[in-house]
Image (spheres, rainbow, N blue to C red):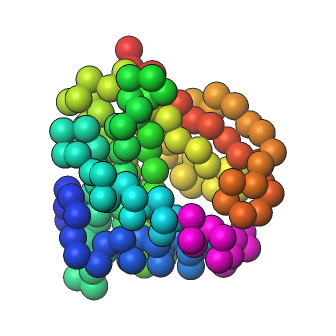
Amino acid sequence: MNIHAGYIPGCIGRVVEMHASFYARTVGFGAAFEAKVATELSAFCLRFEPERDGLWLAQGATGIQGSVVIDGSHHEEAGAHLRWFIASDASRGQGVGAQLLEAAMAFCRARGYRKVYLWTFDELHAARHLYEKHGFVLARTQRGAQWGKEVNEQLFTFDAP
């Protein structure tokens, strides 16, 4: 699997599709979630600044198989925001997620980002394992519905030494 830095035509649709399919099947998220991912990812790509933001795509023989984003637009106040991290069903369990997270965290280190954060929820055990392996710690848990269905939301943070 090749990790590509930056936009590839069609990647917005593919990243949205991977999220929509996986989360509909595993936790019952619907149109509200898919629309949120599509809207926010599109807006991110339009304001993307390569010195501040990062987008990595895992590419295999059959196309894009995973993604992760670092949104650095508020890194000074809140920290860099890790978003849209996913591996396709076909590539899950093959180290793609670890490669994507390493690319994102190397970017943060190179930019001197002292804090990185992400929001997730408590049903994603494999992702949590990867986050913790890369130095993230659970900072807060709360009930919420930002993804269109009520879940136990989790805030994970990484503070550089």
Position of residue 150 in the picture relative to residue 115 (left or right)? right
- For this orientation, the residue located farthest to the top is 161
Instruction: Please state which of residues 134 and 36 is positioned toward the viewer in this rendering.
Output: 36
Q: Quadrant of the N terminus?
A: bottom left
Foreground residue, 54 or 87? 54
In the rendered structure, does residue 151 fall within the stretch colored magenta? Answer: no
Residue 101: % across, % down: 37, 47
Q: Main secondary structure of the magenta part?
A: helix
**Residue at the location (30% across, 33% down)?**
108
**Residue 126 point in image, percent of width and height:** 57, 55
Residue in the foreground of this view, choosing between 92 and 108: 108
Residue furthest to the bottom: 62
Location of residue 102 (image quadrant): top left
Q: Which residues are magenta?
A: 25-36
Vertical comparison of 112 with 83: above or below: above
- Taking the image as drawn, is residue 93 in sight? no
Q: How many marks?
A: 0
Q: State yes or no: residue 28 in magenta.
A: yes
Image: 114 above or below 39: above
Q: Is residue 62 above or below residue 117?
A: below
Instruction: Answer whether residue 36 is visible to the viewer in this image.
Output: yes
Residue 151: image location, x then y, percent: 77, 54
Tell me which residue sits at (73%, 73%) in the image: 28
Q: Where is 80 relative to 88, above or below?
A: above
The image shows residue 107 at horizontal and vertical percentages of 25, 38
Task: Name which residue lies at 20% across and 56% down.
Answer: 5
Tell me the residue at 80%/57% (across/down): 150
Q: Report the side of 75 relative to 2 (left or right).
A: right
Quadrant in the picture for the C terminus? top left
